Amino acid sequence: MTDGAPLPRPLIEFDTPRLRLRQWCESDLAPFAALAADPQVMAFLLPLPARADSDAFAERIQARIAANGWGLWAVERKGSGEFLGFTGLNVPQVALPFSPCVEIGWRFARHAWGHGFASEAARGALQVGFEQLGLAEIVAFTAAGNLRSAAVMARIGMREDAAGAFDHPSVPEGHALRRHRLFRIARAAWPQAGRRSSE
C-alpha cells in the first residue's frame, strides 16, 4: 500500500564501450564544481558561480533521475571510475517554442574533450530514449556560437531545424547567448542515423 504518492520508476543506467552512465553520487559534486568553474567549459552556458550553485544543480538532476528513472546521467570512465561530466535526456523546465519536448544534453570537463566521449555517451542516451522510453522525437539546442556542441549534434545524426532558431527564455534579453540553434532527430531516423554516425 502507498499513501498515494507516485512510486519511483525503475532506474535506467547503462554502459557504452568506454563509459558508464549512472545516477549521481556524493563524490561527483567536487569534480562537477571544478567543471562548472572552468570558463572554457561554461563559455556558452549561464554560470554556476559558487559551489552551492553547482551542488544544487547536480542535486536537482539526481532527484529527477530518482523520480523518472532517467535524466542527465553522470558519466564516468570505465576502468578508472573518473567522473567526466554528464549526458542524458531532460524535459525542459521552461516553455520553449517547440514544447512539449525531450532534449538531449551533455557537459564534459575540459580534459575529456577531443576523445569522442560526448558523441559516444549521447548515442547511448538516444538509444535509451528511442528503444526503452519509446520517444517519438528528441531535440537538442545550443547557443548560436557553440560550434563544438553543434558538431556533436550533427555527428550523432541530428539535423538542424533552421526555421526553429529561437531566443531562449531563460537567457536575459540582450545577452550574447540568448539566440539558440535547434536540432532534431525522430525515432524513425534513429537506426540509420545511429549506424552512420558511429562509422
Image (tube, grey):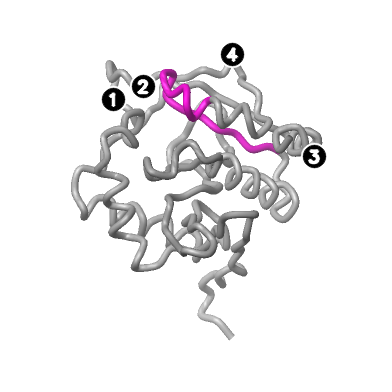
Q: Earlier in the sequence, mark 3 or mark 4?
A: 4
Query: The residue tagged with tag 3: helix, strand or loop?
Result: helix
- In the drawing, what numbered circle is on residue 99? none
**Residue type pointed to by label 1:** Pro
Quarter placement of the N terminus: bottom right
**Residue type pointed to by label 3:** Pro
Q: In whole angstroms, how far apart are the C-alphas of marks 2 and 4?
A: 16 Å
Residue underneath mark 3: 191
Q: In whole angstroms, how far apart are the C-alphas of marks 1 and 4?
A: 22 Å
Query: The residue tagged with tag 1: helix, strand or loop?
Result: loop
Instruction: Name the quadrant containing residue 184.
Output: top right
Q: Earlier in the sequence, mark 2 or mark 4?
A: 4
Residue underneath mark 4: 163
Residue underneath mark 1: 172
Bounds of the magenta span? 137-150
Q: Residues within 10 Å of mark 2 (few under 14, many from 20)?
A: many
Quarter placement of the C terminus: top right
* Residue 102 part of the magenta segment: no
Residue underneath mark 2: 178
**Residue type pointed to by label 4:** Ala
Label 1–label 3 contact, CB within 8 A = no
Q: Nearer the viewer, residue 17 or 178?
A: 17
Label 1–label 2 contact, CB within 8 A = yes
For marks 3 and 2, give the one nearer the viewer.
3
Please identify the residue farthest to the top as the structure is shown. 163
Q: Residue at position x 56%, y 56% from top? A: 19
* Residue 145 part of the magenta segment: yes
Residue 41 lies left or right of residue 81; in this view the side is left
